[in-house]
Image (tube, grey):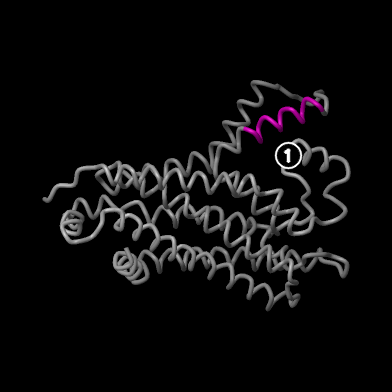
Amino acid sequence: MYAVFRKELADYLSSKRFGILFILVLLAAVFAVYLAIQNIRGVVTPTTEFVFLKIFVASGKTLPSFLFFIALFIPIVGIAFGFDAINSERTSGNLSRLLSQPIYRDSVINGKFLAGLAVLSVMIASVIAIVAGLGLRIVGVPPNSEEILRLIAFVLISIVYGAFWMALSILFSIFFDRAATSMLASIALWIFFFFFMSMIAGAIADARMPIDQSSSLEMIAKNIEIQGMLGRISPCTLYGEATTALLTPELGSLNPALLMISTLTAGRMLTSLPFSQSLLLVWPQVVSIIALAAICFAVSYIRFMKEEIRSI
């Protein structure tokens, strides 16, 4: 497995795909953070807490926050690293020649997945570190120990989120013979979860609990609760809730109905949650993402171990 891991790692790091994706993600993230920092300067006061974390969650006047961009690009990077992991090797005949050597079959898929995960981890950690350094240079406020812990947790959750999309694309690369088909299937599922799932959840909630301008607060809360429950089917929603709660210590609940009532009444919590409480708050979302990634890889592993591979 180590030999496969080294070979795949070298291929990833030396490929044009890696360079293009890294530059694209970095430019988008830096530009978004730069605009957000300009906005932060006008709202930060001497009593403002967790100023450094606001670099990642604040949005500019024309662009969304860094958190939005990282949630948008991580699935693309994960899919790009996994959509042709198996079927391209199978089509070219390299897979049959590789398995004819004294190498275990599970070492192939394990080595490919671990190499892609290592490159994905390096990319995510590097982008967040560069953005944090840029923010520190411009804002001039160093992070405290709790902010550093929250950023480390943010990096780890982002890696797990990327691992899910890479495992999903590897699954499609095993089930489909053509790399283009597996890529289209992965991108289609990402588009559905990222863009359309919230619309579908809203439509179902409106059908179950119709609301209008004369609706009571209880009816509105019920409608939003249904939307949130259905929206959590999407891993994009789970990742967004987990990272938002980690990078926003003032957020005391992930219940959409409670958030809506809090917004209409007193706004956010007056006191910030400690890191341990924020971690407990997002733990169900994190476990769900880990479970989805594990399921996708387990199905890929079982299918790859059982399929018949013939020499071409």
For the point 52% across and 67% down, which residue is it? 26
Judge whether residue 262 is colored magenta: no
Determine which residue is flagged by label 1. Answer: 255
For the point 35% across and 66% down, which residue is it? 12
Query: Disc count in the image?
Result: 1
Q: Nearer the viewer, residue 190 or 281?
A: 281
Question: Can you name the residue that lies furthest to the left here?
Answer: 312
Percent x, y for residue 151?
65, 64
Q: Is residue 54 left or right of residue 133?
A: right
Looking at the picture, which amino acid does disc 1 mark?
Asn
Percent x, y for residue 193?
52, 40
Percent x, y for residue 272?
82, 57
For the point 71% across and 28% down, which residue is it? 223
In which image quadrant can residue 56 be found? Answer: bottom right
Which element is circle 1 on? Answer: loop
**Considering only vertical position in the picture, is 42 above or below 306?**
below
Q: Nearer the viewer, residue 217 or 39?
A: 217
In which image quadrant can residue 222 be found? Answer: top right
Q: Which residue range is magenta in the image?
A: 218-229
Q: Is residue 78 left or right of residue 222?
A: left
Percent x, y for residue 1?
32, 63
For the point 64% across and 33% down, which residue is it? 229
In which image quadrant can residue 107 be found? Answer: bottom left
